Image (cartoon, rainbow, N blue to C red):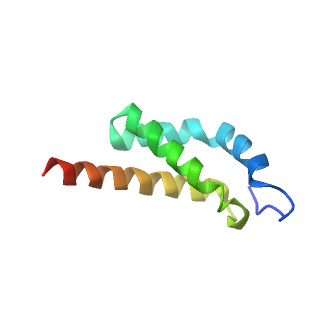
Amino acid sequence: MTRRSSDESAAEWIGPLYDRFAAGLYRYAVMVLADPAAASDAVQEVFAGIIDRLPRIDDAEHYLRRAVRNECYSTLRRRRSQDR
């Protein structure tokens, strides 16, 4: 996907992006977190946070993959700190 023009709203893009990438992002998150509920939460957090940034993102697929990875790692760090 390419950068959107300023006259297109993020809301018009979020649905198609979700439809295209959510399943794969979820599968990845399940592999990393080994917890389907936490994986679903991670993907939802990323999509909720992308709305404001969407007009500035050049490569949505790359951004989403990186953001889900980072969210998964943050979840794992929180788990480790809670286990102490």
Q: Extreme right residue here?
A: 7
Image point 40% across, 32% down: which residue? 36
Residue 15, image x, y percentages: 71, 41
Identify the residue at horizontal 55%, vertical 39% (top origin). Answer: 24
Residue 77, image x, y percentages: 28, 55
Image point 75% across, 48% down: which residue? 11
Q: Residue furthest left?
A: 84
**Residue 46 percent location from the top left of the image:** 53, 50
On the rendered image, what quadrant is the N terminus found in?
bottom right
Residue lying furthest top: 36
Q: Position of residue 71 (x, y in %)?
A: 43, 53
Q: Give left or right: position of 27 versus 51.
A: left
Q: Quadrant of residue 10?
A: bottom right
Q: What is the count of numbered marks? A: 0
Instruction: Decide if residue 68 is on the left or right side of residue 21.
Output: left
